[in-house]
Image (tube, grey):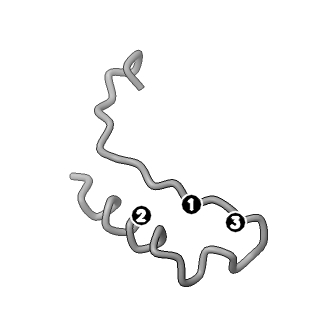
Amino acid sequence: MEHLRWKNLGNVLAGRNGHVGDIEGKPELQKAYELGKSIE
């Protein structure tokens, strides 16, 4: 990111999502949504 002069606004790691539907109900989904909304 530094070589592109991008600012790191955060990240969300959500492992063990190898199948459709695995992310449902995980708190990381809400965290990703909130991070996306915070980007101007």
Viewer-side label of 1, 2: 1
Q: Amino acid at mark 3?
A: Asn
Query: Residue 25 at x, y = what percent?
Result: 54, 84
Cβ atoms under marks 1 and 2 closer than 8 Å: yes
The answer to whether residue 3 is left or right of residue 34 is right
Residue at image mark 1:
14
Task: Tell me the residue at 47%/68% (across/down).
Answer: 28
Tag 3 near tag 1, CB within 8 Å: yes
Q: Is residue 5 left or right of residue 11?
A: left
What residue is drawn where x is 42% and y is 26%? 1
Q: Residues within 10 Å of mark 3 (few under 14, many from 20)?
A: few
* Mark closer to the chain start, 1 or 2: 1
Amino acid under disc 1: Ala
Mark 1 element type:
loop
- Pinpoint residue 7: horizontal percent, then vertical percent: 29, 32
Q: Is residue 27 above or below residue 17?
A: below
Dot 3 corresponds to which residue?
17
* Tag 2 residue: 32
Of residue 26 and residue 32, the one placed in the foreground of this image is 26
The quarter holding residue 20 reads: bottom right
Tag 2, which secondary structure? helix
